[in-house]
Image (cartoon, helix red, strand yellow):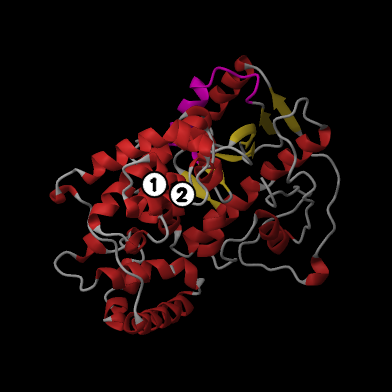
Amino acid sequence: MAERSCIRLPGARLLATRHMSDTDHKPFNPAKVQYELVTTNERLAELCRDWQEKPYLAMDTEFIRTTTFYPHVGLIQINSGGPTNYLVDPLPISGWQAFQTLMRNPAITKVFHSCSEDLQVFMAAMDVVPAPVFDTQIAASLLNQGFGISYQNLVNARLGIELPKGETRSDWLHRPLTETQCQYAALDVDCLPEIYLAQREALVQQGRLSWLEEDCDTLLQQYRQEMLGDFSTFYQNIKGAWQLNRRQLAILRELANWRELRARKRDKPRNWIIRDRNLIDIARRMPERIEQIAGMEGIGKQFLRFEGPELLALVSDAAAIPESQYPGALPRPLDGRAKTQLKRGQQFVEEQAAKLNLPVEVLARKRWLVNILQAMPLEGEADERLPVGLTGWRKPILLPGLLEAMS
């Protein structure tokens, strides 16, 4: 984990409401932390039995993802609240059943900092989404300790300790792991329990723990949905898709779904399969012959040879479906009037955030407000057309005032 490590100093305590002054900052203490490298199925199973009795597990992962679709896990770090940091080496381990059961145990909170990529690691490596999750980065935002703060900066701000980043780009798949790598990895979870306990207490005191739980569960739901293997809506995220008519969108929908499946099967980044702009061009032109694709910038001969016939078949099949099965038109970018409404909405959010001592981005993202404007007027049951982020704890804070401000 990059920029998310710390060392526990004797007697150190994390204060959720205290900021260190510049004179309090201490240089990194290179003293070693305690860790155990776990390399066998038997030892992992033994630890999992012990961890099943713990209320929480502080976790992190190290992985490589430079030329692949999936992150390739090189190490899993775990601290159960004790002095030992466990470094689970996934390369020699083949038996993950006990660990998968542990990750699904609803009585154990899995503590991460900025967990999105870690969740992708668990999905790719062992087909499981850990739950429930406590994300200390989300907690820091709700406690107004910084929006999107890195673990390194959070530790620096709360404990006044400056931490190294020497192994950020290390090769975590090379064996044997060096002592420096193991120390770096152990540091990433060594004081995470301390941060978690302090943040949790502060959230309880401020009545915001349920906010944290809701935001983390919303994040988990996105990954659970992805595990279902339905990528039929991925076309909506392609830049410029709004310019296509409904028939062309039907083609783009199939092309985007095909690319997603192909990228996952080959374990290559999406754009290594075919770029967004090429998908848009193919959907717009609806080619019937290979030669019509060959003239597109960025389409190589090798791609045409192996993928061209299948792409043409997808285009033909999608273009032939009944109009009743076309997807709806995508919302257009905001016009001048809507941009004025957006500014009024942003001002309203800023005012509410200031009252709650929250970062503006935590209370409402700009894209949520854009989505509301694109869906206006909201008729009938408004929840059905509101962004997911505005249907939970934020709803009584922002609505109906936000809708009135932008109407």
Tell me the kind of residue under disc 2: Gly
Where's the C terminus, which quadrant? Answer: bottom left
- Left or right: where does residue 83 sit relative to residue 247? right
Rate crowding at label 1 as few (under 14), some (14 to 19) or many (20 or more) other CA atoms within 10 Å: few
Q: Which residues are magenta?
A: 90-109
Q: Is 376 in front, or is 116? A: 376
Residue at the image position 29 percent from the left and 66 percent from the top = 331
Residue at the image position 61 percent from the left and 33 percent from the top = 73
Secondary-structure class at tag 2: loop
Residue 316 inside the magenta-drawn segment: no
Can you name the residue that lies furthest to the top here?
42
Q: Which residue is mark 2?
A: 295
Residue at the image position 51 percent from the left and 40 percent from the top = 120
Asked if disc 1 and disc 2 are in contact, CB closer than 8 Å, the reply is: yes
The image quarter containing residue 176 is: top right
- Left or right: where does residue 305 sit relative to residue 401? right
- Left or right: where does residue 71 sit relative to residue 25? left
Q: Number of labelled discs?
A: 2
Relative to 287, does residue 304 appear above or below in the rendering? above
Q: Is 42 in front, or is 286? A: 286
Q: Which residue is mark 1?
A: 292
Q: In this view of the protein, can residue 91 be seen by the observer?
A: yes
Residue at the image position 56 percent from the left and 56 percent from the top = 137
Residue 245 image point, x, y percent: 26, 59
Secondary-structure class at tag 1: helix
Residue 173 image point, x, y percent: 70, 30
Q: In this view of the protein, can residue 224 be seen by the observer?
A: no
The image quarter containing residue 182 is: top right
Where's the N terminus, which quadrant? Answer: top right
Residue 97 inside the magenta-drawn segment: yes
Tell me the kind of residue under disc 1: Gln
